[in-house]
């Protein structure tokens, strides 16, 4: 008798945890329909509720509340880590019941997004599905394949979504208005082709996950004279060759090429392959992007809000409700989008070099993480023991500012990680403004030696990764922005939109944290007016011209393009009011070298206006910028000669003032 076992986090639902430990599960798109379609099949859960007393009980309660009547057999509910085949063997053995013989492992199906967990389930003999949509395919032992879907000129993404949502197809990335990477069964591929789409099947999904690897190496003259499709194929082939060579002997089965991607190559990576550790020669920030399956990827719910922003700051966004102006609110906050003198003054007072330095010192190991304690942070790497400690400390600081704090749980390489969200909510607000950065760090470019003095690879669990600039500076800026809002609220000023501060985890592992966050926000129909991401804002080489980069470029078609440009223009207009000596480099459209390379890209995927603001990283001529020279090394410290809290304050003030103005202050 078949039994279906489901993972919860990210597969069945998005998990949101309050600081008091209470847990809410929000079902993912198409999940309820799948569960109900298999109402006569026994269903269970194999999921890790996390550590701590009562974690399993809280998870069980949240499961019952989110999926009433769908998981009723407690004998089929299994809580615990999925870092080996053990829990899957136990689940199969536990399928026996009163008058019910135990099911064979081959009759059981594990449905889970994490490819490593699917690999362990496969070792235990279970069939696996990478998404609930493919539950039927797994039961019937039908393969699911990686697929490149080409759209004809007369069919757009909405038409593809309509077909995909009626069959066994789940998109993972929008390369352009004419190309989408997806998972599909043969049945799903046939439905797409019958509807007029071209489907190129590349290989089985099984226990693989998809990544986009960008290649920053310059094209050779011979490659440069070829036409665009040929050049893209040449680059993709070359990039895949380098990645495959670096991982040779470390992975079985081998990597699977999925064809050209924007600026590089798509790769299907088997469980256990350390793809995030691969750096092509000359790799720049954000060269690796993890791709997540999502049936709602094509809907891009942020487009209505992006369309309103692109029309200008005085236009109301589609679907917005009128919010009365607060007495004493500066007129400019609702007018041309430029911060008022009052807002600029408040930001200057709160977002200071001293405040930023203090935050960076605590999270980069110069000073204790918490007042009165001795703990010094060694690394915020996603694999490091200090990462959850930093999460907890940042959440506490936000809570002390009177904000509503929530932790967004996700998993990476079997580890539970959290994004930190803190929000000031406004009754009747039409939308939310996000001020963001990433809290994790890495020193993967550093030089390390063993006890014999011989070179050895970076060990993220023990090696120092202070990350003072990347992205301690951005994290500090978000904290200072929250403190600024706290002061403004104490003075009686009130925004008309919600203001949300978000610190993403595992950005260095392919934007993983923000991918999960934005996907969950889209599923929850979140209304986001704009996203301001700060990623590396303190790097300035001595003697160089202070230059701030504003990245708005998006490969995602639609209103998000103009809306993000508009958001970037608002920051560009604010910078001179903060410091007229700073040069602004506003990068837009397809020529923006940072497309897809920081956490703002996760929001572009959903149609929301978003920008990334940074130091001078990407020089216009393709050469090195004037920012930090300690990118991803242990030398990225507060005392590095290129680390400038003064420059960081200019950037943080410009972003904070613009974001708070968009929020109605």
Image (cartoon, grey):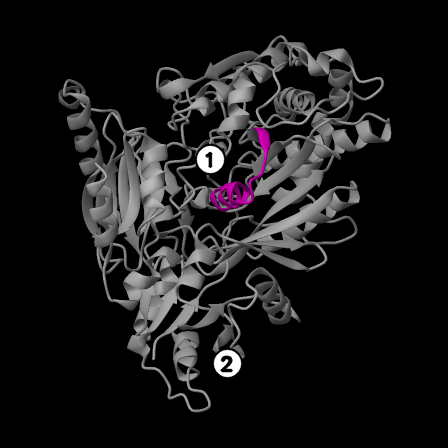
Q: Position of residue 516 (x, y in %)?
A: 49, 46
Which of 375 and 231 lies nearest the eye of the viewer?
Answer: 231
Secondary structure category for the residue under label 1: loop
Q: Residue at x 54, y 46 (%)?
A: 505
Q: CA distance from mark 2 to mark 1?
A: 39 Å
Position in image of residue 533 (x %, y %): 55, 30
Task: Classify residue 338 as left or right of residue 485.
Answer: left
Q: Which residue is mark 1?
A: 606
Classify 61 as above or below 183: below
Q: Quadrant of the N terminus?
A: bottom left
| Image coords of residue 651 (percent x, y) | 61, 22
Give whichever of 350, 343 is nearer the camera.
Answer: 343
| Mark 1 Cα-neighbour bin, 10 Å: few <14, some 14–19, many ≥20 | many
* Residues drawn in magenta: 514-530
Q: Quadrant of residue 434?
A: top right
- Asked whether 515 falls inside the magenta stretch, the response is yes
Label 2: which residue?
A: 75
Horizontal placement of 241 versus 387: left or right? left
In the image, residue 414 lies in the stretch drawn in magenta: no
Residue depicted at 69% across the width and 44% down the height: 367
- The answer to which of marks 2 and 1 sits earlier in the sequence is 2
Asked where in the image residue 484 lies, by quadrant, the reply is: top right
* The C terminus: image quadrant: top right
Task: Specify whether residue 457 is in view.
Answer: yes
């Amino acid at each position: 008798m078949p039994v279906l076992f489901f993972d919860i986090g990210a597969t069945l639902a998005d998990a949101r945890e309050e600081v008091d430990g209470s847990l809410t599960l929000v079902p993912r798109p198409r999940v309820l329909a799948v569960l109900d379609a298999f109402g006569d099949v026994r269903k269970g859960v194999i999921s890790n509720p996390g550590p701590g007393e009562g974690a399993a009980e809280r998870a069980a309660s949240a499961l019952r509340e989110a999926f009433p009547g769908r998981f009723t057999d407690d004998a089929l509910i299994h809580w615990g880590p999925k870092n080996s085949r053990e829990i899957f063997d136990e689940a199969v053995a536990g399928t026996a019941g009163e008058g019910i013989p135990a099911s064979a492992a081959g009759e059981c199906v594990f449905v889970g997004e994490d490819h490593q967990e699917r690999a362990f389930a496969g070792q235990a003999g279970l069939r696996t599905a990478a998404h609930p949509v493919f539950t039927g395919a797994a039961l019937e032992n039908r393969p699911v394949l990686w697929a490149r879907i080409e759209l004809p000129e007369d069919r757009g993404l909405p038409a593809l979504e309509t077909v995909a949502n009626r069959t066994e197809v789940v998109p993972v990335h929008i390369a352009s208005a004419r190309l989408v990477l997806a998972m599909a069964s043969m049945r799903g591929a046939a439905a797409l082709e019958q509807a007029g789409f071209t489907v190129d099947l590349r290989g089985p999904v099984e226990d693989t996950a998809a990544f986009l690897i960008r290649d920053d190496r310059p094209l050779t003259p011979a490659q440069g004279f070829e036409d665009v499709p040929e050049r893209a194929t040449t680059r993709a082939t070359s990039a895949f060759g380098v990645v495959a060579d670096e991982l040779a002997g470390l992975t079985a089965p081998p990597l699977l090429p999925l064809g050209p991607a924007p600026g590089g190559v798509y790769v299907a990576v088997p469980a256990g392959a350390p793809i995030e550790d691969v750096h092509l020669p000359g790799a720049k920030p954000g060269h690796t992007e993890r791709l997540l399956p999502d049936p709602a990827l094509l809907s891009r719910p942020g487009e209505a809000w992006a369309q309103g922003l692109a029309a200008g700051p005085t236009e109301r966004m589609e679907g917005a409700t009128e919010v009365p102006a607060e007495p004493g609110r500066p007129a400019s906050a609702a007018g041309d989008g430029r911060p008022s003198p009052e807002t600029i003054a408040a930001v200057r007072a709160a977002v200071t070099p001293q405040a930023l330095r203090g935050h960076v010192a605590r999270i980069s190991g110069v000073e204790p993480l918490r007042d009165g304690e001795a703990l010094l942070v060694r690394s915020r790497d996603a694999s490091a023991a200090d990462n959850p400690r930093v999460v907890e400390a940042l959440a506490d600081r936000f809570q002390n500012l009177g904000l509503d704090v929530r932790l967004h749980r996700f998993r990476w390489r079997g580890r539970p990680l959290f994004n930190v969200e803190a929000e000031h909510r406004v009754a009747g607000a039409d939308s939310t403004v996000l001020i963001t950065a990433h809290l994790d760090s890495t020193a993967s470019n550093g030089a390390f030696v063993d006890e014999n003095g011989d070179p050895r690879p970076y060990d993220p669990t023990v090696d120092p990764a202070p990350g003072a600039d990347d992205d301690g500076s951005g994290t500090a800026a978000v904290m200072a922005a929250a403190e600024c809002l706290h002061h403004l609220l104490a003075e009686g000023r009130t925004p008309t939109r919600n203001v949300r501060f978000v610190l993403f985890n595992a950005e260095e592992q392919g934007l993983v944290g923000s991918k999960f966050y934005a996907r969950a926000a889209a599923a929850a129909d979140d209304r986001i007016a704009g996203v301001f991401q700060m990623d590396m804002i303190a790097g300035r080489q001595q003697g160089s011209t202070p230059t701030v980069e504003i990245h708005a470029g998006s490969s995602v078609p639609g209103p998000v393009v103009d809306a993000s440009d508009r958001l970037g223009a608002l920051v560009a207009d604010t910078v001179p009011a903060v410091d007229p000596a700073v040069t602004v480099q506003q990068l837009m459209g397809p020529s923006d070298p940072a497309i897809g390379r920081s956490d703002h890209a996760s929001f572009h995927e959903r149609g929301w206006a978003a920008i990334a603001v940074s130091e001078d990283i990407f020089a216009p001529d393709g050469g090195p910028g004037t920012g930090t020279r300690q990118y991803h090394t242990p030398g990225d410290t507060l005392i590095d000669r290129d680390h400038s809290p003064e420059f960081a304050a200019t950037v943080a003030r410009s972003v904070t003032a613009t974001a708070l103005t968009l929020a109605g202050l």
